[in-house]
Image (cartoon, rainbow, N blue to C red):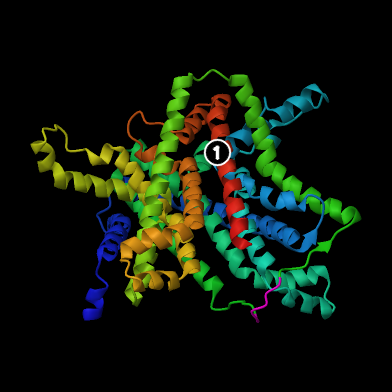
Amino acid sequence: MQRRLANVNIWTVAAIAIIAALFLPNLTIVTGLFTPSNDNWAHMKEFVLWSFVTNSLILVVATAASTILIGLSLAWLIAQYQFPFRRFLKWALILPLSIPPFIGAYTYHGIVNYTGVIQTTLRERFGMELNPAHFDIMNLPGAIFIYTVFLYPYVYTITQVFLSQQSASLIESTRLLGKGPWRTFFQVVVPISRISIIAGASLVILEVLNDYGVVKYYGIQTFTTAIFQSWFGLGDIETSIKLAASLMGFVIVILLIEKILRGRRQYSYSSTKVRPLPLIKLTGWKAFAAAGYGFSILALGFFIPVIQLIDWTVLTFGTIPLDEFMSYIRNSVFVAGFSAAAIIVFALIVGNFARLVQGKLAKLLPKLTVLGYSIPGAVIAVAVVTAFVALDEFLAPLYQLAGLNTTLVLSVSIILLITAYIIRFFAIGYSSIETGYDKIGTDFQDASRLLGAGLTRTFFKVDMPMMKGAIVSGFILVFIDVLKEIPLTLILRPFNFDTLSTKAFQYASDEKIMEASQASLLIVGISALAIIVFYKFLEKELD
């Protein structure tokens, strides 16, 4: 008991309060499963729920398979072979992450539709008679293509870092046994990379389940579109909660499958002398093919959509009033910057608590906060709104004392949106901070305490300077994700509050694709710049 009381300090109290605030709203979704059904839910369950499940499954399975194929092959090429432009491709292949899939979706539709550059060129320059149906990508295969070319970097990045740092002994042993490149790849590289591949593919699956922009624009019925329809189309919050709870169950099943696939098998270094993989120089057509493959994927995922966006931006420049456009930028930077800063502060508090306090409970509690990233944005939106409406009802007497004529104050404010961002993206900031704490350990902290400094003084004078890299990396990653977020922002933004992403989505939904390019290009530019800065930090950390 005395030992537990010794752990109680301002850091412990603050950390537990943060963990509770981040976790509790999700319980409202779970309880929604046990509320009585209404007619809308009964109708949906009988006639259309199965199509939501089928479409979601097809998107998830096909996208996971294609991103693994592309991400793993690129990771192996970069990690094992030397060829022209390899150094450039090593970081440039991450750039497709800077383009939100919904922007990629309407950009590619604009490129291949009847008035797009491809059909126009083939008709007018070469006199070809074309069947427009052959160029239609607004369907399931089209959505899978969009997700693949813009989300493969999740698999590529994690697997490439793993392969580059993996001890070369396993692969060299395989070659000494007379195995060729293909057998080495399938019999050694794929098995030892299994955990990295599954980790990357899991992120892809969660992104696909969370996405609203692509499936809404392409008219594909999934869980996320159904939540929007029941909420905004039918005004039925009960059905939205039940759909959100079903989607949450779907996500939990996927996470359990991921856990089973990972298994207990681990591949670790057999000695402390870990050597990176020695690069094999490719010459002739092999070098040309390797570089060509990398540039082809990069062109599909970055260069082609960006060139198209630049072209549209030049054509429509000035059509959106400058002051209006500047307000979108201010709103975007404000919510992204404020949310990222809040997440990093909270992550520092929770991470410090997990590091300093001993016991299984202290290790388990912070893990609850990272569940938010595995839950789709539409589900979190439903959970946060339900919790804030209940909070407003609880605080209603105070509002009346303050002279307010409404009981909805917090649930229609910007605080609601930022809270949802924090719940959704806390895991990203926390992972970076947790890694930083692991690296610095507790030796310096112990030395500071022995010299008489308190916990708080030690944190600011010793820990913070050493955590600079982790803080900057975590801030950048959260900032990018909030900047690109669509479902949460569309549902929870206050009246007349638009960001770059919501405005781009609205223009595209209203078939004003060219006008959507200006906001989209700015999102891509800021995200690409942030990714390059993050990559430089990552390289420095790895060195």
Position of the C terminus by quadrant = bottom right
Residue 272 or residue 120, whichever sits in front: 272
- Residue 456 in which image quadrant: bottom left
Q: Is 425 or 300 nearer to us in this picture?
A: 425
Residue position for label 1: 526
10 Å neighbourhood of mark 1: few (<14), some, or many (≥20)?
some
Q: Is residue 28 left or right of residue 168?
A: left
Residue at coordinates 66% horizontally, 72% vertically from top-left?
Answer: 192
* Magenta extent: 270-275
Q: Tag 1, which secondary structure?
A: helix
Q: Residue at x 48, y 20 (%)?
A: 322
Question: Is 274 colored magenta in this rendering?
Answer: yes
Q: Residue 230 location in percent, x, y?
A: 36, 42
Tell which of 330 and 461 is nearer to you.
461
The relative height of residue 275 versus residue 390 in the rendered view (above or below) is below
Horizontally, is 249 left or right of 542 in the view? left
